[in-house]
């Protein structure tokens, strides 16, 4: 019965794959987290995250039933796709784009940041921005910059920053705040370019 009901609620383009998942539960396979698109009665296709458990007979050999629990994660998938799309766009920008949380920990580091600062994204995510690209003697100035960004929401300025190898260079920064959908301050983003050639 479950298979018959499911067949009508599965979108045509993913029906075969989804039915294969369902069929495998009959042999005792369980799902920890399987995403299966389901067609709502309105006709809208929703993404549902499924977990399943198998019930055996008293001998523990024959499968007599399966229990599946589904959670609608459509909104989460849309948000993930939006973030992924935005990140892919930022990776094409020929400027360094760096975002931090309110504590100054790096939460985003685009591909050109890797080129400019010599750090790979996986090396800096979660690290303090001040301890990563700000020379020690400039750390107090960074606090003033953050205060200005919070006060005005935006700031443009030039700074001497450092690469992974310790070399220093002048950079132009455009800073702004990051807020969530209801306007709560979540962090900061800075877009920077190397001013070395321009200064020369």
Image (spheres, rainbow, N blue to C red):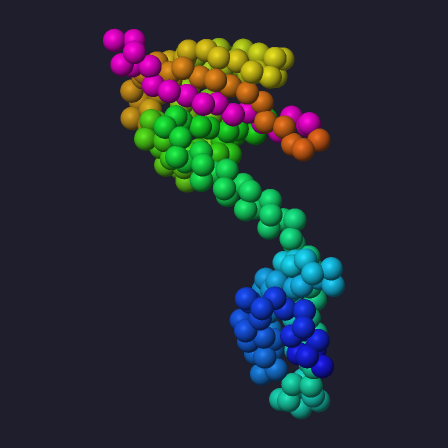
- Relative height, residue 138 to residue 95 (above, below): above
Residue lying at 55% horizontally and 25% vertically, measured from the top left = 188
Judge from the rendering whether residue 7 lies leftward or rightward of residue 123; answer left or right: right
Q: Residue furthest right?
A: 41
The image position of residue 110, as x and y in percent, is 42, 34
The mark tally for this picture is 0
35 or 106: nearer the viewer: 35
Q: In which quadrant of the rendered view does residue 35 lie? A: bottom right
Judge from the rendering whether residue 97 lies leftward or rightward of residue 168; answer left or right: right
Q: Would you say residue 96 sits in the magenta stretch?
A: no
Residue lying at 27% horizontally and 14% vertically, measured from the top left = 197
Q: Is residue 33 visible?
A: no
Q: Would you say residue 198 sits in the magenta stretch?
A: yes
Residue lying at 51% horizontally and 19% vertically, measured from the top left = 175
Quadrant position of the C terminus in the picture: top left
Residue lying at 45% horizontally and 23% vertically, measured from the top left = 191
55 or 173: nearer the viewer: 173
Quadrant position of the N terminus in the picture: bottom right
- Relative height, residue 61 to residue 29 (above, below): below
- Relative height, residue 160 to residue 188 (above, below): above
The image position of residue 46, as x and y in percent, is 66, 58
Q: Which residues are magenta?
A: 183-200
Judge from the rendering whether residue 101 lies leftward or rightward of residue 191; answer left or right: right
The image position of residue 115, as x and y in percent, is 32, 31
């Amino acid at each position: 019965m479950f298979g018959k009901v499911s067949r009508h609620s599965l979108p045509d383009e993913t029906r075969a794959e989804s039915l294969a998942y369902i069929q495998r539960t009959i042999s005792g396979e369980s799902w920890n987290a399987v995403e299966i698109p389901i067609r709502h009665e309105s006709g809208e296709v929703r993404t549902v995250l499924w977990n399943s458990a198998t019930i055996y007979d008293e001998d523990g050999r024959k499968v007599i039933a399966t229990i599946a629990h589904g959670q609608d994660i459509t909104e989460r998938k849309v948000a993930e796709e939006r973030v992924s799309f935005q990140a892919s766009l930022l990776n094409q920008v020929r400027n360094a784009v760096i975002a931090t949380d309110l504590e100054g920990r790096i939460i985003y580091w685009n591909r050109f940041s890797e080129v400019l600062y010599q750090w790979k994204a996986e090396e800096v995510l979660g690290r303090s921005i001040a301890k990563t690209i700000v020379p020690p003697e400039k750390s107090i100035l960074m606090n003033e910059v953050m205060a200005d960004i919070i006060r005005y929401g935006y700031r443009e300025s030039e700074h001497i920053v450092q690469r992974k190898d310790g070399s220093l260079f002048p950079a132009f920064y455009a800073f702004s705040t990051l807020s969530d959908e209801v306007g709560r301050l979540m962090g900061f983003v800075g877009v920077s370019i190397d001013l070395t050639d321009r200064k020369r």
